[in-house]
Image (cartoon, grey):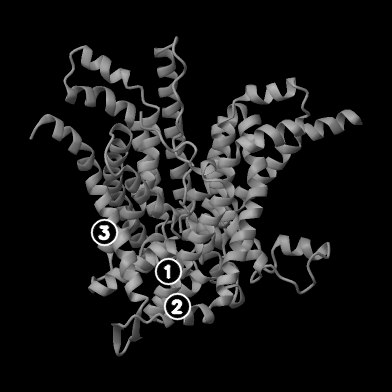
Amino acid sequence: MSRVWAWLRHQAIVIYAGVAVAYLLIPIGVIAVFSFNDPAGKFNYSWEGFTLDYWTGAFDVPELNDALLNSLQLAALSTLIATALGTLIAIALVRHHFFGRTPANFLIVIPMATPEVVIGAALLSMFLIYGIPLGFTTLLIAHVMFSISFVVVVVRSRLIGFDRSLEEAARDLGANPFQTFRLVTLPLLLPGVIGAALLAFALSIDDFVISVFNSGDTITFPLFIFGASQRAIPVQVYSVATILFLAVLAAMAFVIWQQRRAERMAAMADEADEPYAATPAFPPAPGAAGG
Amino acid sequence: MSPGLRRRLVPYFLLGPGLIWLLLFFVVPLYFMGRLSLESGTLETGFQFTWEWSNYTDSLSRFDNQFVRSFIYAGVATLIALLIAYPLAYAIAFRGGRWKNALLLIVVAPFFTTYLIRTIAWTTILSDDSFIVDALQTVALLGDDGRLLATPTAVIAGITYNFLPFMVLPIYASLERIDQSLIEAAKDLYSSSRQAFTRVTLPLSAPGIVAGTLLTFIPAAGDFVNAFYLGSINQQMVGNRIQSLYLNERDFPTAAALSFTLMAAILLIVFLYIRFAGSEALMGDEEEVE
């Protein structure tokens, strides 16, 4: 009996963690399960019966498709811009000494420490005062703005673990600066940049709070859900959300797998040296509340 | 241009575009929101800038309940999230083994579904004829006509859930960095497991706790989605009022004043908290230039 107790005490934390993991996964499970529901009335709140209708017809709601298309375009554009701007900032912060580091750092951290509702409201205030019409452009401005800081954080964490002797070696072997960048720096930096881009994409496609202030008549996926939730949410939203979930999951798993492979190769390359510093594919993202 | 000058200018060219974007679309908008918060008038007559400080006092006295609620809900949710997250992060860091990455992926999995949808999923889970409400009624924790939706419990549960990954990740990162030999050294010096934890592990993970609580508390205090879906009019938070004043009632000065007060209050709390917790706990590993 005491052995059982000792085992239980040893495993208590693992059991507790298991319950916490279940708590994290329950709503996701509910979404997936209810995408197979066949609701009797307009409301998809209680289980009525199994159907595949909303998976085979996942894209049968034209407004939902338009919203998804808007979201994808917006996320792709804002990811592209924010990743470029953020990567440049990260390189400057890690590689260069310059006057004004502290204020620059401050400017990057503060947006992540500001509640989204304030960011959205402030942008709307400016657009109102200048009479700028709200729509796709204002959404793009907002999405790039809140993504930059996160890109900087991710790329910077990758740059810090960067072995600069590799670049020196390339130059010693006769590579010019451009070749060094293309053949050494970029491939080593790429996992960090891809991780940052994925995060920026996920933040953008999921943003509700800042978007609701600055969208005008442009409807994104979260804004469609918000509008629909005041009447009745089409079941297709659940199937599309599940599809998005699986896509992001696959992308993240791929990045982690790539990164581990890169680390293993790096560790093999300098056996004598200590193993390559591991940097996570996605950061302990501060402020990525989504919404 | 001399090469020396060019070299000194390089960082500014790299920083320039991104920082200008942040200046134009983060700092400047805050200035305009400040200006808007001091205007008077109505939507019909138009708004004029009149140094209308009474917007602040009026909005505070009108919405004091929502303010108090925001900070209480955010505080309680942060505390519960810490109680859930610390053991979870500990288990992943020290007992995760080869499953670490997979477990971390599960921790951030909620972020892979749309924020609104996972909050709406909670309305299904907590709805009046749900399994949970039935179970709680059976064990008499909830009266026969008791409900979970439209209660503070539901709103706090939703906030805790939605921001939990922000708590887990920094705590995990700080636990992961701990040199295991320190814990072994403590045990070699005859500390009990409990002493090794309270004297070595816990202090070394303090930066993660400080970062996690901040990253949870800040968005939680400004949130309005959970109160919107899981609460009723009696659980409204400041965020709800800001959203509706801007977008429905279109009383921009009051809304702007409310936003500024919220931001100031959060900054004040964060400042006091960091003073109390020690800034090195948060900023400890920030400087990395070679």
Q: Residue at x 69, y 45 (%)?
A: A19
For disc 3, the marked residue is B24
Q: Residue at x 83, y 62 (%)?
A: B139
Looking at marks 2 and 1 on the same chain, the residue that comes earlier in the sequence is marked by 2
Can you say whether A58 is above or below B98 in the image?
Answer: below
Looking at marks 3 and 2 on the same chain, the residue that comes earlier in the sequence is marked by 3
Task: Determine contact: label 2, label 1, CB under 8 Å.
Answer: yes
For disc 2, the marked residue is B56
**Residue B65: x %, y % from top left:** 59, 76
- At label 3, counting other C-alpha atoms closer than 10 Å, the crowd grade (few under 14, some 14-19, many 20 or more) is some
Q: Identify the secondary structure beneath mark 2.
A: helix
**Labels 3 and 2 in the same subunit:** yes
For disc 1, the marked residue is B260
Q: Tell me where residue B171 sits by quadrant.
A: top right
- Chain where mark 3 sits: B
Q: Tell me where residue A30 sits by quadrant.
A: bottom right
* Front position in the image: B155 or B18: B18
Q: Identify the secondary structure beneath mark 3.
A: helix
Q: Nearer the viewer, mark 3 or mark 2?
A: 2
- At label 2, counting other C-alpha atoms closer than 10 Å, the crowd grade (few under 14, some 14-19, many 20 or more) is many
**Residue B119: x %, y % from top left:** 55, 60
What residue type is disc 3 on?
Leu
Q: Nearer the viewer, mark 1 or mark 3?
A: 1
* Front position in the image: B248 or A89: A89
Q: Residue at x 33, y 30 (%)?
A: A189
**Residue B176: x %, y % from top left:** 57, 32
What residue type is disc 2 on?
Tyr
